[in-house]
Image (cartoon, rainbow, N blue to C red):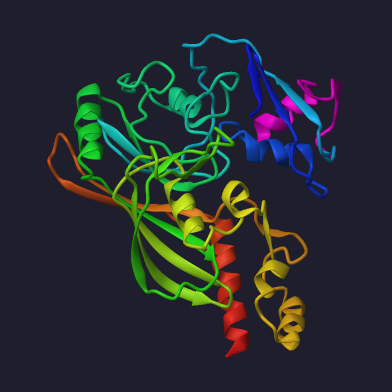
Amino acid sequence: MDEEESGQIQLVVKKKLSSKRIDKYLVSRLQDFSRSHIQRLIKEEAVKVNNVAIKSSYEIKLKDVISVDLPTESSDHITPEDIPLNVIYEDEYLMVLNKSPDTVVHPARGHASGTLVNALAFHCNNLSSFNGPLRPGIVHRLDRDTSGAILVVKDEKVHKHLALQFENREINKEYLAVVKGEIELDSDRIDLPIGKDKRDRKKMAIRHDNGKHAVSIFEVLERFPGFTLVKVFLETGRTHQIRIHMKTIGHPVVADTAYGNSEACYLEDLLEPVLNKDIHNLAKEAELCNNAAGSIIERQALHAYKIGFIHPVTNEALEFTAEIPEDMCNLITTLRKIKALLN
């Protein structure tokens, strides 16, 4: 992000990108904005390229100057919205939800609608205000396009206890990811510090100078031609930690726009590592994915599969599993079918 004024974000396209729509470009650059919110801003002509309003289909060009006008709004008011919640567990003190992809957890400046917090304000009478008025009930977060288990707290005392469990690394967080390449090791521990990217402050990077301690442990669950399904445990909870760590060891998460240089995954991408042309033909004829001509997944293939913690009131050890969403299930199923064709 090259310049940020009051009520406006400005970006300059500094890399030549072939045939990239502006809505997809902004989704990749503005991690705190959902696709639907960006498309709404474009429709309202709040997005301009070289001072001219454009459509979502506009293809960006090198040196384009993009400005995004943010609506002015109250900084401490949450508007309740009737957005469905996928509740895994709920009691009078807390909730565990299965967050869907393309859902921002809490409002950011100029983005006060369509978030998980807006949905919580509609569905819940009480939420902890421990983290301030814009993050009621939020004790931790997931990236916009990371799906899965997220913990929400209704009581402030419970919030403090759970925050301490996070601080002491007593919360068990387990993720599933499909990554590029076939990982040789069955498991490994990645211990690399993470900090702000020097060139793009919206992104993170490995920083040995001033990065924060970050540790991820992965286990290989299944290997496919050119891809691997892994389980990842977090010892720390840095922003974009899994995505950065997997990229650094040469296995970026599939369809990770920010760190994997691909905004979607298609059947052709999954067949690329397979050299057997007969397999390519068989796969296309069988239409291995639900939409063989379209994309299989349009966000990073990363899912918060499990979360475990000690209930601050009952002192009971709890563990919850979040069902894998359809797009990621389809990706894994398609990879398994391609693998079966080779056997």
321 relative to 330, above or below: above
Q: Position of residue 190 (x, y in %)?
A: 36, 58
Highlighted magenta segment, given as a residue range = 35-57
Count of numbered circles in the view: 0
Instruction: Depth check: give the residue in front, 208 or 76.
Output: 208
Q: Quadrant of residue 332?
A: bottom right
For the N terminus, the quadrant is top right
Does residue 37 appear left or right of residue 121 in this picture?
right
Identify the residue shown where x is 58% and y is 81%. Answer: 339
Identify the residue shown where x is 49% and y is 76%. Answer: 223
Instruction: Depth check: give the residue in front, 201 or 216.
Output: 201
For the C terminus, the quadrant is bottom right
> Could you tell me if residue 324 is visible in this image?
no
Identify the residue shown where x is 39% and y is 62%. Answer: 231
Q: Position of residue 99 (x, y in %)?
A: 47, 42
Does residue 313 appear left or right of residue 166 in this picture?
left
156 relative to 72, above or below: below
Identify the residue shown where x is 74% and y is 37%. Answer: 14
Indicate whether residue 44 is drawn in magenta.
yes
Q: Position of residue 308 (x, y in %)?
A: 26, 49
Does residue 128 appear left or right of residue 76 in this picture?
left
Q: Position of residue 152 (x, y in %)?
A: 35, 33
